[in-house]
Image (cartoon, rainbow, N blue to C red):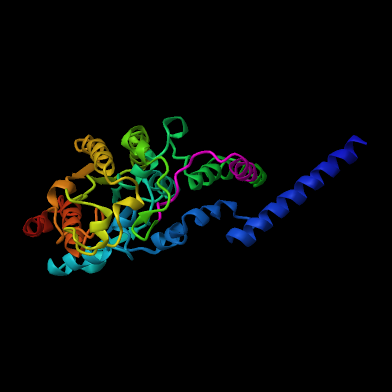
Amino acid sequence: MKVRLGLYLLFIFFLLEVCARLYFYIAWDTPLFAKENMIYHFYPELNGVKEKYYEDKSKIKLLVLGGSAVTADLYCDLDFELRSINRTMKHDEREIRVYNLARSGQTSFDSRIKRQFLADLKFDYTFIYDGFNDCRANNIPKEYFDIDYRHFMYYQEVDLYMQYIKNHISILPFCFNFIATKLFNFIKESPHVPPYYIVKDNKVLDASYWEEGKKIKTITSFSKNLKEIYAIQNKVPNQNLILSTYAYYSPNDYSLTRFYKKELDYQEQKWPTEIYGDYRYIPSCVDAHNQILSSWKDSSKVFFIELNSIIPKNKTYYNDICHLTDSGCMMMAKQIYSIIYSNDSILHNATNGIQ
């Protein structure tokens, strides 16, 4: 009887496992026998990176992590700019290979997860450009704030992946917790931060908890994510981290109305500050994160750029509060290029002219 019951339970377990894997195969395109590929549902930009890496013959490999400000197909294409500088310096364009995994709306937590996923790959330089999108996480009452940003529903799911997919042979622990989290959020609507705030007809549709943004709660979270990335970097020899203060420009006469009328000292004026939160509180948050970044400037295997001070505050270099123009992007690329070649005796003199 006990044997029969055991076999019955084993059959039920096997059936549930198959059903769960089939669901995520259909819904998330996750292979039946490669549940770890579920990470591509959250970060599709990671798909194929390892394969490309092992085929890569370039001399210098640069990993770029961050948000939309350095997303190649949106604003700042560092790969293009670095190749352009290489041509100017009459160097081989293929010498540097840029792996740009930055994506819109992502925070330092996303950068930490991606670097962890690629921990076994050696990148000569990893450029982290975070410190702005993290500020959205402050728009929540203190009692609901989570150090790993689980007050974003999206990060709740990412956290479940990190807890259960990597540490369990079965997919069922993840599946059960995934369903439980969905049900809990449906039954009890706890305060959470949306992916971004919607601005329509010159108005913000949902400005819930914006006043909470005045209280900066992200300092510990931001520091933790940077420390985690640094620890991952140090596990493989001869890797360097490039950190930079986050360059931003908030004119004194800023208002949503003036933004949409294109009356501000910006070039493109496409994304208003309000998609991130209250424009009055964003600058102080970025300044706080920049102070954390500045504290790393004397650390081993860390190169530091004071980009927020280097880039002039005017429409030649800014499309809005945080997205750089082509001119601003070129200034960023020049700083990175100079760092990469700072230890090369042949190229060092040539790069002096592009500071």
**Apparent side of residue 352 relative to residue 55 in the rendered image (left or right):** left
In front of the other: 3 or 290: 290
Residue depicted at 61% across the width and 40% down the height: 184
Residue 123 seen from this side: no
Is residue 304 positioned above or below 27 on the image?
above
Q: Quadrant of residue 272?
A: bottom left
Report x, y in % for residue 179.
64, 45
Residue depicted at 13% across the width and 50% down the height: 310
In front of the other: 338 or 284: 284
Residue depicted at 10% across the width and 58% down the height: 351
Instruction: Please tell me how many numbered marks the rendered image carries.
Output: 0
In front of the other: 129 or 325: 325
In front of the other: 27 or 237: 27
Residue 321 seen from this side: yes
**Apparent side of residue 54 relative to residue 244 in the rendered image (left or right):** right
Report x, y in % for residue 107.
37, 47
Is residue 68 positioned above or below 86 on the image?
above
Farthest top residue?
Answer: 143
Location of the N terminus (image quadrant): top right
Q: Quadrant of residue 304?
A: top left
- Span of residues in magenta: 179-198
Report x, y in % for residue 350.
8, 60
Q: Is residue 237 magenta?
A: no
Location of the C terminus (image quadrant): bottom left
Report x, y in % for residue 3.
88, 38
Q: Is residue 190 magenta?
A: yes
